[in-house]
Image (cartoon, coloured by chain):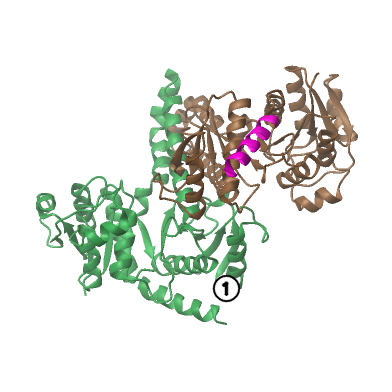
Chain colours: A green, B brown
Amino acid sequence: MPMKIALDAMGGDLGPEVTVDGAAAFVKASNTTVLLVGDPNEIEPFVAQYNMDRLVVVPAKRVIAMDEHPVSAVRQKTDSSLVVGARLVREGEADALVSAGNTGATMAAALLYMGRIPGIERPAIACPVPVQRGEAILLDVGANVDCRPQHLVQFAGMGRAYMQEVRGIANPTIGLLNIGQEVSKGNELTIKVHKLLERSSWNFIGNVEGREVFSGVANVLVCDGFVGNVVLKVAEGLGMMLFDTMKEELAVSKLEQLGARLAKPALYRVRRKLDYTEYGGAPLLGVDGVAIICHGSSDSIAVRNALSVAEDAVRAGLRDSIANTAVRLGGESSD
Amino acid sequence: MPMKIALDAMGGDLGPEVTVDGAAAFVKASNTTVLLVGDPNEIEPFVAQYNMDRLVVVPAKRVIAMDEHPVSAVRQKTDSSLVVGARLVREGEADALVSAGNTGATMAAALLYMGRIPGIERPAIACPVPVQRGEAILLDVGANVDCRPQHLVQFAGMGRAYMQEVRGIANPTIGLLNIGQEVSKGNELTIKVHKLLERSSWNFIGNVEGREVFSGVANVLVCDGFVGNVVLKVAEGLGMMLFDTMKEELAVSKLEQLGARLAKPALYRVRRKLDYTEYGGAPLLGVDGVAIICHGSSDSIAVRNALSVAEDAVRAGLRDSIANTAVRLGGESSD
């Protein structure tokens, strides 16, 4: 049966022009239908440009703004594009939800309407990170700021299922983000998590220091949502600071300006490597269905890539794979 | 009275050649004496090259290696360069201790032999970070992995004293590293710390997100030692990854290679801006005296800069300033 993905067409800083554009690019290369959820007056002018059967507008009156309180917005605005999108998934009208809107609200809507997979205590946001070799995700990056050891073990299991089933990596390596490589290093939380992961049957490679986050040494890197969120934003901030400084310094002398012009394609490729929009959105793992969260400032390429990730996750049976992981974890912990 | 600084001449990855070289460069521009603590056989050949009165070798038989267990190494190797250096400070023979050796051991030696300033519960490592404008330190970056709210308040007060007295910044801005700007955001720890800092008489600017760490929005940025250590190492790793990627990409075409050659001085200045060796070591705040910790891979410039930081800290009366802060904090918390 052909797939349907619900896209919060009103979500994100750049509005429906960008979400529709991303959806059109995605639909062109796939046979999935995208349900563009939002205000028809705002969406249809852009949809009309493409004349595609598989871009379908689903009306929703309101919008949850980027700065609204997530839970209360989701409870009050049941006719918002985000909530209508999440309901489409619950009712079986869509196979997945994609949103570049308010991250907290997306999480709240997914939890409230799609629910958790049985056995999963805390769904987590798994963010793809740019690495020198291979492929890696970091989780949790903000869904759970205070965690118990068992939560991080579940994050590891869910991240593993994602990298294996959706990204096609056999026996993914799992690392624990920590402040030293030795077993004895860490805070109360990570010392306990290390022991639990060591007892698992997974490909646990031990502690990974901050220095190695971007090396690709682990396919799945686990941490609590506070640490993960800080890491993600520090990387974003440092990247911006570096490229700003480079811009200033490359303008100092005529010779350096010329050099910068000649080297521009290479510097652009470096910048692109760091660019989250290339990485296609972060899956919210552990909700009962597929939900993909995009960066608020996503452009149409980012939206297209997020829709692809959603399609891959549905096709690979991510939900069932995580459900099986939860069952096995339940078994292990009751040993 | 002329000052004396004890330098662990054996500490660091690069050995006595580099520590002596840094000490010589420092002594040339100051009238402070550097006590080079370590094995005379290894140190004196380098010292002989300079023929300077104010480079004095203080014999110490053993060395604590970079990978030794900090506390037990300090307890067992009482004749090591690091422990002898710390003892020189306790006995009033030196005004400050500088070490590029095992960070944990330096901390342990400083705590054991110099002790804590009365009222300070947890000394913290304050690391200077490169920022776009102004000047900033991040603390704690690894001395205390599990913290209570009151510890972070003390970190803020100590960091403030350092930036004001030693770095000459009037009424330094203080930020709390957190995952959102709103008061309600954060984990259990940061939500409590936010409330406490709001009640202080300091220039508290509120929560600072990871994205802003390198902007310079706060002169003093507080967090627990686990988060701070991860942030520091993530920044180091991302910087390395970026420059490695740039090297590869700039070699792709002849034109880009030429561009890179022309732009090299600018790229070098960018790299230098990120280079910790330019920042002169991290003060261990809260110990009863002045102790400066250098990165293990410090070169002679880093050692010279760390000695300058130590000299500035002694001259500015950092110890008394922190002692006064502790007294005021004690008064405030007993309100």
Q: Is residue B323 left or right of residue A330?
A: right
The front one of B70 and A207 is B70
Rendered residue at 56%/60% (across/down) = A176
Residue A263 vertical placement versus A37 (above, below): above
**Residue B245 in sight in this render:** no
- Location of residue B158 in the rendering, given as x and y in whole percent from the top left corner: 62, 36
Front residue of this view, candidates B223 and B243: B223
Say whether residue B242 is magenta: no
Q: Is residue A125 shown left or right of residue B275? A: left
Residue drawn 62% across the image and 31% down it:
B162
Q: Which residue is mark 1?
A: A200
**Amino acid found under the numbered disc labelled 1:** Ser
For residue B81, side relative to residue A305 (left or right): right
User: Which of the 4 image quadrants contains residue B86?
Assistant: top right
**Residue B331, horizontal then vertical, whole percent:** 61, 39
Q: Position of residue B310 (x, y in %)?
A: 71, 29
User: Which is nearer the eye, B186 or B52?
Assistant: B186
Q: Which residues are magenta?
A: B320-335
Q: Is residue A254 visible?
A: yes
Which chain letter matches label 1? A
Question: Along the line of sight, which residue is nearer the eye, B219 or B99?
Answer: B219
Q: Position of residue A115 (x, y in %)?
A: 33, 71
In this picture, residue A31 sits left or right of residue B327: left
